[in-house]
Amino acid sequence: MPELPEVETVRRGLNQLTLNQKITGVQVLLYRTLAHPFSVEEFLIGIKQSFIVTWHRRGKYLLAELCLCSSGLSAGWLGVHLRMTGQLLWLDRDEPLHKHTRVRLFFGDERELRFVDQRTFGQIWWVPPTVAPESIITGLGKLAVDPFSPEFSVEYLALKLRNRRRAIKTALLDQSVIAGLGNIYADEALFMSGVLPQTLCTDLQPEQIERLHSSIIQVLKASIEAGGTTFSNFLNVKGVNGNYGGVAWVYNRAGEPCRVCGTAIQRIRIAGRSSHYCVQCQR
């Protein structure tokens, strides 16, 4: 599943390519991709002839602010969640259709933004201008602070983890603790901070929480700079793979030597999710 760095990579690409261009049409190839409204006609009427002002990211959600530029009036919001296998690709109109293409947004006569999704879990919303996005895209209201927000302090993280008697790895995947963090970067941040993934939150020492806070920000920045991680099907809007996977410290490297000490990387399951770690470097 694309995590914060992958979604941020897509957001930056969309802001480079799609702004201030009129949406001239829509083709919905899989109706259940539309989470709101369910009516294709209503969705088309809502976004057609609008322009994208800018793309925002909230956790793993993408939100495009729309306007009717001739009048300056808001045209609402276009929301996208890539889920497990979703891709947003900026393509020529005559590019052959991939069999997993679900929605096409047409811009002018030559370009389009395609939503491709093999597993079909991804969703797209149009939110009317008089409605708060959180009231339609209900997952937004459940998100904690973003790791790049000024609110994400050491004190905030310590408060969120306090009194939680569950593994730190599980807590880091909870979007009500930190927005946008997922399996890959939780493993990476725990390695960088020297904390075992199965450590209970209540057993963490202040210095461990401080290191973890710093490591979360550091690993997310490094992955964004590398264009995200591609282990299966993540592509940026130009169809290019992410490069972080080739330099990952522990994720997806079970049995391979630790890049620091040479000890074989271990893989266990915690609350049904794979966790990778080094028994020598993490305590």
Image (spheres, rainbow, N blue to C red):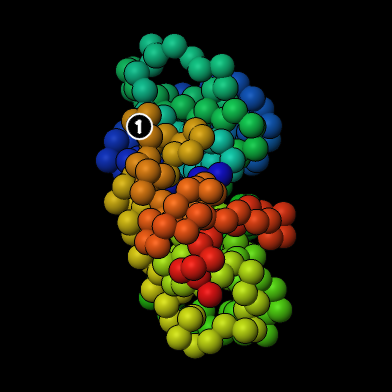
Name the quarter where the N terminus is drawn: top right
Residue 266, quarter of picture: bottom right
Q: Is residue 65 visible?
A: no
Q: With respect to residue 68, does 112 lie above or below?
A: above
Q: Which residue is mark 1?
A: 240
Picture coordinates of residue 15, whole percent (x, y): 31, 43
Picture coordinates of residue 44, whole percent (x, y): 54, 30
Question: Residue placed at 42% from the left, 57% from the top?
Answer: 262
Task: Name the one closer to the observer, 269 or 142.
Answer: 269
The amino acid beneath tag 1 is: Val
Crowding around mark 1 (Cα neighbors within 10 Å: few <14, some 14 to 19, many 20+) is few
Picture coordinates of residue 162, whole percent (x, y): 62, 85
Q: How many marks?
A: 1
Task: Name the one closer to the observer, 154 or 23.
Answer: 154
Residue 107, quarter of picture: top left
Q: Secondary structure at mark 1?
A: loop
Q: With respect to residue 19, does 132 lie above or below?
A: below
Task: Name the one closer to the observer, 244 or 55.
Answer: 244
